[in-house]
Amino acid sequence: MKLLKAEIEVEEIPWNTFNVVEKLSHLEGRWTPVRPEHLSDDEVDGLIRKLPKSLLDVLLPFQMDGLRFALRRGGRCLIADEMGLGKTLQVPILYFLHFV
């Protein structure tokens, strides 16, 4: 940090951000919510059960993983991957589940 500060302006990581990253870096197995807007795996499973079967049947495994990732974080995430992998399908589902 001292070397960086000599060359560029560096801001410290906010304590709440550092705390969340620290907790997440030691997790093994199941997701553990660390922020008020985060959802447990059981809550995520409950939301996913509300989706129509016809919609669940068209989701590919990696799309379901992305959906679970976003739901665990209360919909606060950035979905960024290669074009054509289904972001257009995942985002409306997140929106739907947020308002169900």
Image (cartoon, helix red, strand yellow):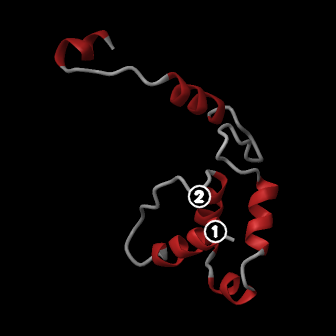
Mark 1 neighbour class, 10 Å CA radius: few under 14, some 14 to 19, many 20 or more? few
Q: Position of residue 55 (x, y in %)?
A: 66, 85
Residue at 49 percent across and 76 percent down: it is 86
Which label sits on residue 99?
A: 1
Mark 2 neighbour class, 10 Å CA radius: few under 14, some 14 to 19, many 20 or more? many
What is the residue that sits farthest to the front in this orientation?
99
On the rendered structure, is 43 left or right of 55? right
Residue at 70 percent across and 90 percent down: it is 54
| Residue identifier under label 2 | 70
On the rendered structure, is 64 left or right of 76? right
The secondary element bearing badge 1 is classed as: loop
The secondary element bearing badge 2 is classed as: helix
Instruction: Say which amino acid is labelled 1.
Output: Phe
Q: Position of residue 71 (x, y in %)?
A: 64, 59
Whichever of labels 2 and 1 marks the residue nearer the N terminus, that label is 2
Residue at 53 percent across and 52 percent down: it is 76
> On the rendered image, what quadrant is the C terminus found in?
bottom right
Instruction: Say which amino acid is labelled 2.
Output: Ala
When asked about the image quadrant of residue 3, the answer is top left
When asked about the image quadrant of residue 6, the answer is top left
**28 versus 68 height, above or below:** above
